[in-house]
Every structure is written in C-alpha cells, then in structure tokens.
Image: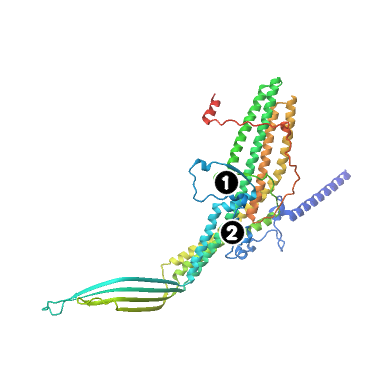
Amino acid sequence: MRLITARLCLLAGVLAQGCIGVRAQQSLDVQQHGSRTDQAPASLEAEADGDGSALIDQSTLPSAIELKGSRPRVDPSAVKPAATSLPEPLSSLGATPSLALPNKTSEVRIRELRPLSLSEVEQLAEVNSPTLKAAASQVEQAKSNLLAALSAWYPTLNLSSSVRFQGSESRQNPANHQLTTEEYTFGEEWITNFGATLNWDLIDPARVPQIASARDSFEQQRDAYLIALRDLRLNAANLYFTLQRADEGVGIGQSAVRSSLVSLRDAQSRLQAGVATKLEVLEAETQLARDTQSLTLAVAQQNTARRSLAQLLDLPQDITPTAADPVQIIGIWQPSLEESIVAAYAFREELDSLILDISINNSNANAALAAVQPVINLSNTFQANRREGEVGVTIDNSVDWKQHSWTSDNTVSLGFTWNIFDGGRAWAQYRQNKQKAQQSEFEFAAKRDQVRLEVEQSFFNLRASNQDIKTTSIGVLSSRESLRLARLRFQAGVTTQREVVNNQRDLKQAQTLYADAMLKYNQSMIQLRRRTGLDQIAACDSLELSNKKPKDDLFDSAEVPIKPSPLNPACKASILQAE
C-alpha cells in the first residue's frame, strides 16, 4: 500500500512539474509573440518598460504637438500625386462637362461596355472625379484667402480725381436805396481735383494672428485634398472589387442554373423510364426556379455595381465599365499590427487637421484680443486743385478762360487709436476661441482612438478573411465532389433527387462564401493601405496556369445553354400564383 502511495505521489509530482514547464513555455511564447496573437492577456501584450513594469504610464507618452509641431505642414511626398491626364487608350473616357445635362433618351442609352483594369479605374477616378476637383478648388480658394491676409503687411494707396463745371451769379443792391441801379456779377470755371492718400498700419495687433489663421486654413485645405484623394482611391478600389464580386455572383448563378437544368433533365429521363416519381421532377423544378431567381438578382446587382463605378469615374453617358481583371488576392500585408497603428498615427492627415484647428482657434483668440490693443497708423494725404475761368464778372464783360489757378496741399499724419473699454466683448471672444481650441483637443483624442480602431478592425478582418479563404476553398472542393457523387448515385438509382438538390445548394453556398471571403480580404487590404498610409504589400507568387478553361465534370463536359425567359409585367406574372 505504501509502495502504491509513493508511486502515485511521484507520478503526481512529475505531472505537476510538466504542467509548470508547459505553462512557463507558453508564457514565454506569449511574451515574445504577444503582438501577433489574440490569446495573450492585456498585461502580457504590452512591452516591458525599463523598470520592469508590464503597463506603460500613459502620462509619459509624447505629445502630438511635440511630434508633429503646433502647425504641421503637408508632406506631398508621403502620397502619390494624382494623375492629371489620361493615356491614349483611355482618352475617350474623359469626364462629361460639368454643366452637361442630357435631355434625350438617345443621349443616355448605353452603347459600349468598356473593360477596365484596377489601375485604369484608379487613374480615371483621379482625372475625372468632380469631388477631387472640388477639393483642389478649395485649396486654391484658401491660397487666395492667404494672399489677401498677407496684404495687411503692405501700405494702401487710394487715388481720387474729379472734373466739374461750376457756374455762379450774384445780385447786390447798393447801400444807398435812393439809387435805382443794381450790381450784377457772374462766374464760370472748370475745377479739376486730384487726391492721393497713403495709409500704412505700422502696428496692428490683429494682423499677425489673422495671417497665421489664414495660413493654417490653407494647410488644412491641403490636408483635406489629400484626404479626398486617399478616399477616392479607396472608393474606386472598393467599387471595383464589388463589381468583381457581382461578376462572380453571376457566374455562380449561371453554374447553379446549369446544374439545376442537368438535374431536371435527369429527373425527367428517369420519370419517362419509370424509375422515378413525379415528386423528384417537382423538386428539380423548384430548385431550378430558386436558382433562376438568384441569377436574376445577381444580374441586377452586377448592373448596379457597374453603374456605381461609372458614377464615381464620371464616364461619358453612353459607356458602362466592366471588370477586366480576374478575381485574385492583391497581396500580403507585411507590417505588424503595432507598426500599422504607429504608421496610421504618423500619416493620417485627419489628425494633422485637428492640430491645425487648435492653432486656428488660438490665432482667432489673439485676433479677438487685438480689438482692445493700440493701433498706430501712418498716413500721407495729397490734394491738388486747378481752376480755369473767372468769377465776379460784370454784365458788361465776358469770362476770361485764360485765367487759371493751382493749389496743392500735402499732409503727413501719425495716428494712434486705442479702444480701452468695449464692455468685455474682446475678452469674451478670446475665451470662446480658447474653449474651441480645447474642444479640438478632445476631438483629437476621439479621432486618435477611432484611427486605432479602424486599423485594428481592418487588420483583424484581413486575418479572418485569410483563414476564411482557406476554409471556404476546401468547402467548394468538397461540395463539388459531393454533388458529383450524388448525381452518379441518383443516375444509378441508389438515392433520391432530394440528395442532389441539397448538394447543389451546398455547392452554391460554398462558392458564395468563397467569393465573399476573397472580396473581404481585398477590401481589408486596401483599407489598411488607406488607413495607415503604408504600401508595404508583398505580391503573391505567380502560378503557372493553363490557358485552357478546365473541364467541369458536373455537366458531363457538355455545354448546357440557359434559355432567356421573357420578362412579363408583374400584374400578368402574379396571375399564375392566383390561379
């Protein structure tokens, strides 16, 4: 008994020591690769500081003002510039004139389906997009506003001139009322006036903050242009991948309809041979109706995706784009999650724009305070008058136009104004703008958290889609083989049509899931590129594929045509259900 007890204790000790070793090894792996896994606890995911603490003191993080500056400037080299012209193959796809408005059906009828690659779509979007052109126009407007603000450093010169004719007459009674005569005089003269006023604000407290605000607004509009350019490229790629997915949906729908036609053909043949029942034919017809409905919906989604892409590209009214590139993985994301987050913090113009908001509000606060600060102005006014003619001419004489006179006056003044008390208006506006600057700081914190969440969502979706592609591809292969075996079993009379229908449905669902996984992977990839500013995408290894289309064994290598069905009005089509 003691021997058994000793052996049990020894075994328990060995197991306990093994468990401790395994757990220690797992803990070491988590600490080394915690940034790449989801199973690690929060305390182990953070890197250890110099003092050995597992958590980072958030108060020691560097300030965005220290990293980016109080007035961050746009770095055009960080973003690939937008295309400005179209090459010869795409020259006919230029943007429709901005104010063009078709008023005939022939002007909007689609006359051409133009296949486009992803690179061509991005190029067309950059050249034709009205949204990007509007953003570029706003940059030019902000530049003009900055030039207007810079003019406050220079003096102003005002010129004025006038020419007028002045006629006068007077009657004067003599002092002695006994006389009956009266004195009458008149005058006529041309007066030419010229004036020039030079003003120069030597000291103006509002000038510097107003120029600083205009300069920051200009930089903010440049950031807005880069944001619009990045969003345009993202939307163009998204719509292109959506169009590819719609094309895949049409292909899946056509394959399902052909499969249902083959099943219906087999069921009808077995019914005529007397080895099948009417129920199996009805099941095949029902499945064919379902697949036809799915194909109709897929075609509608394909048409909608094409026109959505055409709207983004601002193509001519009679051209519809189609996807020329096959559906494929665009690459592999190389940076880690932490590298992606840090890059997003560094490259996102949205964060720079909020920092500029803080600077603009501070400048507006200083400009508001300048209303109660002294202003010194230098002014020089010059006036000149020239008169031609004569006044005080008696009735017996005429005006001598040779007489003329010239007068001039020049005044130099130094002005000083100081609005000492305005009821507290300037200080109230100062505090308001300072509070707006503080609000921008809070918005920066919210945007920073949103930027990280967006990167993490795209990263996690990319990883999940990567796994889904592998899983769904296996599902497609197994479902296709299951359908092939089920059809052989049905033709041999060892199973029913229900098994074939179920396997058809499983194959269609597996193909749909695989297409969705491919779409989600590519969308997550371009979202990461947009949200991080990085373009570190490794291309996939090229595959040596045959240029011949593989043979599909599901249809006995025979082309099964899909006959088009007439489109009946809804009112007429609903009568069949009523009957």
Q: In which quadrant will I find the N terminus?
A: top right
Residue 103 percent across, percent down from the top left: 48, 43
Residue farthest along the bottom direction in this orientation: 176
Give the residue at mark 2: 351
Query: For this view, does 5 lie left or right of residue 107?
Result: right
The CA span between labels 2 and 1 is: 32 Å
Q: Nearer the viewer, residue 452 or 323?
A: 323
Residue 263 percent across, percent down from the top left: 69, 28
- Location of residue 402 by image quarter: bottom left
Give the residue at mark 1: 310
Q: In which quadrant will I find the C terminus?
A: top right
Around disc 1, counting alpha carbons within 10 Å, would you say few (fewer than 14), some (14 to 19), or many (20 or more)?
A: many
> SS of the residue at dot 2?
helix
Tag 2: amino acid: Leu
Around disc 2, counting alpha carbons within 10 Å, would you say few (fewer than 14), some (14 to 19), or many (20 or more)?
A: many
Using the image, determine if residue 298 lies above or below residue 405: above
Residue 36 percent across, percent down from the top left: 72, 52
Q: Nearer the viewer, residue 368 or 416?
A: 416
Precedes in sequence: disc 2 or disc 1: 1
